[in-house]
């Protein structure tokens, strides 16, 4: 198995642009989205994830999405993807192998597909062992604590299992708990295994503790700030702390009808024509108040980006 290129830094969790009624993916806009992420400092792209509404895409849509992102990235940054959303073993195995054939650099597995909410670490590890044994051995893996349909957060024990296996090269951590992150970092002995934090409030502290970057939903609003913070995290300056404070408090917007809010943001301020259609939730959840909050976020974000660009 070839070791994948998984650089430190900012890895956005990608959105899915649809046509106006949401019945099909807008692949032309998807290519524009790839370029927008890269132009704003992305070090890699996480395609076909929860932000992509992968549980609401067909198997063929998930694969074509990944193929399009790989083609549009054109080697400028690596691309990883998930997409094994089924419950049964055989379908998951088929989907995983076929996803890797799209040209992605690594396949991302979901821990909640390998054990129920009530089952133990031992069950998770046993089921993962069975799956990996059947998976194409050339496929490099990552793991993502996907919140849907339930969030299975890795314990230090299961994190160490992934790191020590030699098959996994990164974890997208969504625990939002600095003490848990420190415990996972302490459990990892494999220098090739990286942890990317999805939580904005703990990002700076997590990177100073040993995490290698950010992979969260707020990169769909102001990715340049996360790119900058990842690059400057180990500098003890007032500006670094201020950027951290800014991204930490503005991340509250992710609780407001996401991913619709992110699609509206892109449509209004970054990528005109980006459809606000969504399959995972109703547009009725996007209230007029959220629209005003996005206006404020845009003005503040642009000012902060201009400030760091001048340094």
Image (spheres, rainbow, N blue to C red):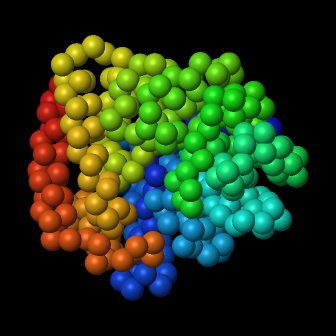
In the picture shown, does residue 205 fall above or below 91?
Answer: above
Could you tell me which quadrant the N terminus lies in?
A: top right
Residue at figure coordinates x 41%, y 19% from the top left: 208
Quarter of the image for residue 81 reads bottom right
Rendered location of residue 85, percent (x, y): 65, 64
Rendered location of residue 175, percent (x, y): 49, 39
138 relative position to 193: left or right: right
66 relative position to 301: left or right: right
Residue at figure coordinates x 28%, y 78% from the top left: 284
In the picture shown, does residue 65 fall above or below 111?
Answer: below
Outermost residue, top side: 236
**Front-lying residue, 170 or 101:** 170
In the picture shown, does residue 132 fall above or below 64?
Answer: above
Residue at figure coordinates x 39%, y 60% from the top left: 33
**Front-lying residue, 264 or 272:** 264
Quarter of the image for residue 84 reads bottom right
């Amino acid at each position: 198995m070839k070791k994948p290129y998984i650089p430190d830094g900012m890895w956005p969790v990608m959105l899915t642009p649809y046509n106006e009624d949401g019945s099909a993916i807008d692949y032309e806009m998807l290519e524009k989205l790839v370029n927008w992420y890269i132009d704003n400092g992305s070090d890699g792209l996480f395609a076909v994830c929860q932000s992509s509404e992968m549980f609401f895409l067909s198997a063929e849509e998930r694969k074509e999405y990944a193929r399009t992102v790989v083609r549009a990235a054109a080697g400028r940054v690596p691309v990883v993807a998930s997409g094994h959303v089924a419950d049964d073993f055989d379908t998951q195995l088929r989907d995983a192998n076929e996803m890797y054939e799209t040209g992605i650099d690594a396949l991302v597995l979901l821990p909640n597909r390998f054990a129920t909410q009530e089952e133990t670490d031992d069950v998770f590890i046993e089921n993962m062992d069975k799956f990996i044994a059947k998976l194409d051995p050339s496929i490099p893996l990552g793991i993502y604590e996907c919140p849907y349909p339930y969030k299975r957060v890795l314990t230090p024990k299961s994190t160490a299992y992934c790191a020590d296996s030699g098959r996994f090269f990164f974890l997208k951590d969504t625990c939002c708990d600095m003490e848990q992150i420190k415990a996972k970092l302490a459990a990892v002995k494999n220098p090739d295994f990286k942890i990317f934090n999805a939580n904005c409030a703990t990002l700076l502290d997590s990177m100073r503790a040993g995490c290698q970057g950010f992979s969260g939903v707020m990169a769909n609003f102001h990715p340049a700030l996360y790119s900058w913070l990842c690059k400057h995290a180990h500098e003890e300056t007032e500006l670094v702390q201020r950027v951290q404070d800014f991204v930490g408090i503005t991340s509250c917007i992710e609780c407001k009808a996401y991913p619709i809010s992110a699609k509206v943001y892109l449509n209004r301020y970054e990528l005109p024509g980006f459809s606000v259609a969504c399959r995972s939730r109703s547009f009725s959840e996007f209230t007029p108040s959220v629209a005003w909050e996005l206006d404020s976020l845009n003005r503040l974000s642009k000012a902060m980006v201009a400030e760091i660009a001048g340094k």
